[in-house]
Amino acid sequence: MTVFPKPLVIPIFIPNLGCPHQCIFCNQRAVTGVAAKMSDAHHIRSTIKHYLQYKKPDRTVVELSFFGGNFLGLPAQWINRLLTDVAPFVADGAVDGIRFSTRPDTVDNARLRYIRKYPVTTIELGVQSMNDGVLAAANRGHTAAQTRAAAALLRENGYRVGLQMMIGLPEDTPETSLITAAAMMDLKPDFVRIYPTLVLADSPLADLYAQGHYTPLSLEACVLQLKTLYRLFAARGIPVIRMGLQASSELNDPSVVLAGPYHPALGHMVLSDIMLDAAKQALAEKKAHGKDATLTVHPAGYSRMQGLGKQNLETLKQCFGLGRVFVRTDAELPEDAVRVSC
Ligand code: SF4
């Protein structure tokens, strides 16, 4: 497990703006609590200033990110206006770069020409799946071939490329998600995000769910799939920078998330489970049954080793009949290592 330094990200939501399709799973307004309208320059400036208060000396990178819509699908004058509003913050050094997410089928030479003069550093593609059947079932309106072409064009134009995938979409299976991950790895992304499919109120998926035509992943199955995918990407040195949607009061509302594997700390759960597996293996190798044990991990892995509510430590005690269990840190250890002494 590799822990990558996190930039301070300043989010500017553009919920569902620039979307040519209503993807079956999507309701950005529900996710963000923000109505579908363009942010004005005043709002953008005050958002940036608000977030910059949290800039710490050890935060080396500050990125401004347009989220939640299809950035390159916006009319050209909107793109120019948004980028013109934020570019001065990059020019004066307060912000290091601009990123946005967009659909693969809106990446083309003409649109990339619009943005060439702005300090955009990173572009994320909503890949969702590399299986055309899954894409069609999700009403994405683009194909895997378009994702390949878009990623190649972004690379040629010198952008950092992030890829977003989803698991648990209609017609998706653990096997097709592995194929999606492998196809994404072939595109050599700089990072990926993985989102489980949730049934959001007022989305087309909510209708399918209500009619009994869609069954979401359980939280357990979701964590298992994410573990597998995380390990695959990590083995290729590709950072998984997010698993699960950003927690928000909207997502905690059961009238917004009707069903599906939502948990406010999903990524932490997955990483904690991976640490638990590593600790089990190390304890078994040490033949630690019935003893007190000290688990030493990299400082970045301390809370992951404990697990939510220290659940990992309880599990280890039960599995190995341990007495007391201590967690210590050692910055010299690799970030995915667990050293056991007993
Ligand atoms: S998933 Fe993206 S492209 Fe589809 S409706 Fe939502 S914001 Fe628009």
Image: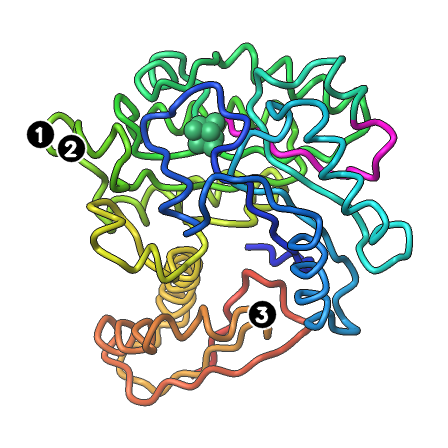
Foreground disc of the pair 3, 1: 1
| Dominant secondary-structure state across the stretch colored magenta | strand
What colour scheme was applied to this rendering of the protein? rainbow
Which quarter of the rendering shows the N terminus?
bottom right
The disc placed on residue 209 is: 2
User: Disc 3 marks which residue?
Assistant: 300
Please tell me in which quarter of the rendered image ligand 1 is found: top left
Q: Residue at x 23, y 40 (%)?
A: 217
User: Disc 1 marks which residue?
Assistant: 212
- Disc 1 marks a residue whose amino acid type is Gly
Name the quadrant containing residue 221.
top left
Give yes or no for residue 41 being in the magenta stretch: no
Q: Identify the element where label 3 is drawn.
A: helix
154 and 105: which one is in front?
Answer: 105
Give yes or no for residue 116 being in the magenta stretch: yes
Say if mark 1 contacts mark 2, CB within 8 Å.
yes
166 and 221: which one is in front?
Answer: 166
The answer to whether residue 128 is seen in the rendering is no
Q: Residues within 10 Å of mark 2 (few under 14, many from 20)?
A: some
Q: Is residue 80 left or right of residue 254?
A: right
The answer to whether residue 77 is seen in the rendering is yes
Q: Residue furthest left?
A: 212
Expressed as whole percent of the image width and height from the top left, the position of residue 315 reads 26, 72
- Disc 2 marks a residue whose amino acid type is Tyr
Q: Residue at x 17, y 27 (%)?
A: 208
